[in-house]
Image (cartoon, grey):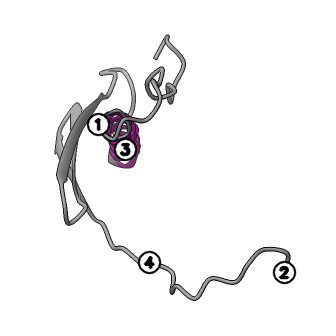
Amino acid sequence: MTGPMSSRAPAVKEWRLNLYLSEHDPDTTARIILDTGDNVLESHAEARRNPYDRAIPEIGDELAAGRALIAMGRLLLRAADGDMKATGAADTDGPVPLWLPRE
């Protein structure tokens, strides 16, 4: 080991994330609630099946859940950016995008 040893035990936190999926063919909606213990964040997203495609509910679930998780990631990055600015950190350009602009 090259660095100094720390006598501090590692901090362990548990954040609770609940993901709710609701299907009303052809639409699937995902709702995520993240409880950090200090804050509660919520995100939503949808997926819509093309009427000419076969009904495979798992695909709608995956799309809606994935989109809601991306939205939650953006909320967390914005919260961190605001917290950094509130502590007087050097100006930031804001959070880096998680997806291409054509999303």
Q: Position of residue 67 (x, y in %)?
A: 37, 36
Q: Position of residue 38 (x, y in %)?
A: 19, 61
Residue 1: give its label: 2
Q: Are marks 4 and 1 in contact (CB under 8 Å)?
A: no
| Distance from Cα at disc 4 to Cα at disc 3 | 25 Å
| Distance from Cα at disc 4 to Cα at disc 1 | 23 Å
Q: Secondary structure at mark 4?
A: loop
Q: Viewer-nearest of labels 4 and 2? A: 2
In primary-sequence order, the first of circles 1 and 3 is 3
Confirm whether the magenta stretch covers residue 60.
yes
In primary-sequence order, the first of circles 4 and 1 is 4
Residue 42 placement, left or right of 52: left
Give the residue pinned by disc 3: 69
The structure residue drawn at horizontal position 37% and vertical position 44%, both measured from the top left corner, is 69
Q: Label 3 neighbourhood size at 10 Å, few (<14), some (14-19), many (20+)? A: some
The structure residue drawn at horizontal position 62% and vertical position 82%, both measured from the top left corner, is 6
In primary-sequence order, the first of circles 3 and 2 is 2
Q: Secondary structure at mark 3?
A: helix
| Distance from Cα at disc 4 to Cα at disc 2 | 21 Å
Residues rendered magenta in the picture = 58-82
Q: Which residue type does callout 2 highlight?
A: Met
Quarter of the picture containing the N terminus is bottom right
Confirm whether the magenta stretch covers residue 16.
no
Q: Is any part of residue 101 visible from this angle? A: yes
Q: Please tell me how many numbered marks the rendered image carries.
A: 4
Q: Are marks 3 and 2 in contact (CB under 8 Å)?
A: no
**Rendering quarter of residue 4:** bottom right
Judged by its main secondary structure, the magenta piece is helix
Q: Label 2 neighbourhood size at 10 Å, few (<14), some (14-19), many (20+)? A: few
Give the residue pinned by disc 1: 86
Q: Which residue type does callout 3 highlight?
A: Leu
Residue 11: give its label: 4
